[in-house]
Amino acid sequence: MSWLARDRTIAPPGFNRWLIPPAALAVHLCIGQAYATSVYKTALVEHFDASLTQIGVIFSIAIVMLGLSAAIMGTWVDTNGPRKAMFVAALFWSGGFLVGSLGIFSNQLWLVYLGYGFIGGIGLGIGYISPVSTLIKWFPDRPGLATGMAIMGFGGGALIASPVSTALLAFYDPNSGAADWVASGDAVGKLFLTLGVLYLAYMMFGAFTIKVPAAGWTPKGFDPSTIKVKALVTSNHVSARNAIRTRQFWLVWIVLFCNVTAGIGILEQAAPMIQDFFRQGDGTSLVTAAVASGFVGLLSIANMGGRFAWSATSDKTGRKNIYMMYLGAGTVLYLLLALFGGSSTGLYVVLAFVIISFYGGGFATVPAYLRDLFGTFQVGAIHGRLLTAWSAAGIAGPLIVNAFLDAQGTPGELTAAAYQPALLTMVGLLVIGFVANLFVKPVHSDYHEADAAPGASAQPAMTGDRT
């Protein structure tokens, strides 16, 4: 299988770098299905006769494994190249759906944890980081734009998966026309089988078409000295091993954790949440299941658009300044959502849309933030280690929301007031992230690599003030 080797993916002279984003999107649009899990969450609650928290664990395990596999495999991805990484990611992600479907058909929830959560989560992590460092190398002149192009597909995955999943569930369930219809477990199992096959094909397309730039390649007319125009942008390099020893790494870790926890709780509960916010006294909601599914798709647009628009904007504003907006403005918007979101569907949708655009922007901007602070050497591996913040958030976000909701009542009977404690908790987290971002400053030279060429083993002296 030598065709998977990194040296088989080196682009020839004259290769058009704009052919790379479609390959990255082929992977990220597939693994972005993780954001559409709320479409069938209620169906799984009923099928397994489980609580929201028990079903939410599926998503949490997947996100935990995303962060852990990205952290553990980050250096392996950098060394072996994106084609092999995408190939492996496709096998794990698709395999997770197949094992998960077996769990649904056999009514064994632990198999869904193992399949979609554990196995699929490994595919999520490897697939997530594999195109990012590659695109940063192809677009050294616009790192924010590059990471936005790579990661916007992950945010937009639900834009495709949500309506497709809803349509397939209706197709597979003969009772789909009934009032207050909730899909059967059999329909969800068949959906998992279908998605597993489709995603395998599309992710393989990305693996077959990805390329890496030749050593020393730069865009025509690009002068590397022009990128060092802001205080936090370095022309030096820090290894992954040394990066995690810096204060900056852990401050950015806190920033990402807080931003992700605040957004992930909404996304994981998006479809039932909007129905609960506008539930009437008789127990019915002004928002139908079909409209709620469309709302999930709308949030996917916000997630995807924010990843591209805000990360590209960060090339002009600087990464630290854009995070001040994500966290500061996000705090205000969450307060408004908690206190006034139930007064108008229009207000609710607008607030949620902007909040999730900040959430997506935070994901897409962080690889460029790391590139600014630590250089391009092993930035993929550093990014992988930082994604453990996503793992922690994948536990904290759904746990906070689901625990509060389970304490308030049962699904289908909740109201907007039941969500206030969870949303106000998110406000506190955003404030913490805002403060952490204030303390980010350039990495001390003690951590810089003497030789940042691939395979370099030089280690800087670790003496003096290392902040």
Image: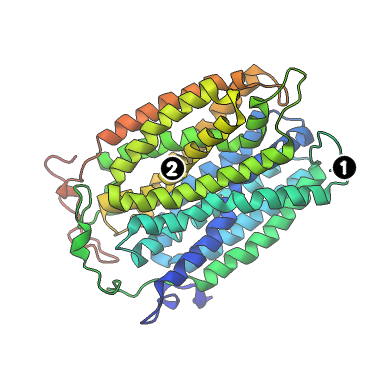
For the residue marked with disc 2, what is the amino acid? Thr
Extreme residue in the left direction: 464
> Viewer-proximal residue, 103 or 136?
136
Report crowding for label 1: few under 14, some 14 to 19, many 20 or more residues within 10 A (C-alpha): few
The number of discs equals: 2
Frontmost of labels 1 and 2 is 1
Residue drawn at x 56%, y 34% is 266
Q: Could you say where residue 351 lies in the image, as x and y percent from the top left?
A: 51, 33
Q: Could you say where residue 180 lies in the image, as x and y percent from the top left?
A: 81, 33
Q: Left or right: 101 with respect to 319? A: right
Q: Could you say where residue 25 lies in the image, as x and y percent from the top left?
A: 52, 61
- Please say whether residue 241 is visible from this viewpoint: no
Q: What secondary structure is marked by label 2?
A: helix
Extreme residue in the bottom direction: 13
- Work out which quarter of the rendered image holds the N terminus and state it: bottom right
- For label 2, the residue is 388
Q: Is 41 situated above or below 377?
A: above
Residue 175's tag is 1
Which mark sits nearer the N-terminus, 1 or 2? 1
Residue drawn at x 38%, y 50% is 311
For the residue marked with disc 1, what is the amino acid? Asn
